[in-house]
Image (cartoon, rainbow, N blue to C red):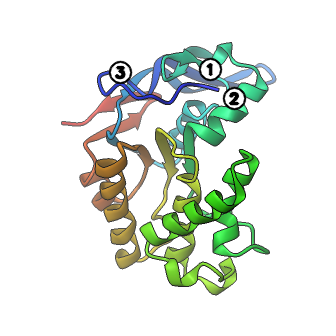
Amino acid sequence: MLNKTLNTDSPILSCTDLGKIYSEGDQQLTVLKDISLNIKPSERIAIVGASGSGKSTLLNLLGGLDQPSTGSVSILSQSLASLNDQALSDIRNYTLGFVYQFHHLLPEFTALENVLMPLMIARQDKLQSINKANELLAAVGLSQRSTHRPSALSGGERQRVAIARALANDPACVLMDEPTGNLDRQASDSIEQLMDTLSEQLNTAFVVVTHDENVASRMDAVYRLDACRLERQA
């Protein structure tokens, strides 16, 4: 498992000359090319671009969910290419958090039980895990909804449960793919404010793929993905 002691001058997550090419028969499709990026503790960046430009592909590469065709990804200065499957799984459970446009909560479990899942997988103490899960639900404003299953929660509430779950093992960085895409403005504002608070209080970094200009405008930096390349916007 990687050491999560953070040096605020060193990147949590970085990639160098990253590229992704898909092959089908004799045809090749280049989706990403020569992408380099460094993300430091508490930094919040937005990645924007047209549909189909490769934003989700980039997020999957940064999270170790897919392998690049060229270049490298490092988390806390350790290359993902050097890790075996178990070590990669540990990173996803301990060092990174993931939040998607669709919450992917387990429908048969309560909000509390969903947040508990990563802690149970990590074999944490059960009582301490329950206390922590309750604290996280309180942090996202859902203390009174902990016993409700996803079907009894609103879209915004489900997404906040997903964020609490992503934070269960104190990740150094949270990767978010269109986290407010299915939410109304009020729910989106709540999610944005939560990211601000967590960044300030816990030094959590956020990488957010979004079409929402309001979300992007609140980030520390905005990068646009266009023609396979990533460029920082002024």
Relative to residue 29, is residue 26 drawn left or right? Answer: right
Given contact means CB atoms under 8 Å apart, are the residues at marks 3 and 2 in contact? no
Label placed on residue 88? 2
Residue wearing tag 1:
80
Question: How far apart are labels 3 and 1 at the CA level?
Answer: 17 Å
Closer to the chain start, of discs 3 and 2, is 3
Given contact means CB atoms under 8 Å apart, are the residues at marks 2 and 1 in contact? yes
Name the quarter where the C terminus is drawn.
top left
Q: Residue at x 55, y 69 (%)?
A: 134
Residue wearing tag 3:
10
Relative to residue 104, is residue 176 drawn left or right? Answer: left
- x and y percentages locating residue 120 in the rendered image: 73, 53
Q: Is residue 209 above or below residue 230?
A: below
Q: In front here: 64 or 119?
A: 119
Relative to residue 44, is residue 180 drawn left or right? Answer: right
Callout 3 amino acid: Ser
- Residue extending furthest toward the left: 234
Name the quarter where the N terminus is drawn.
top right
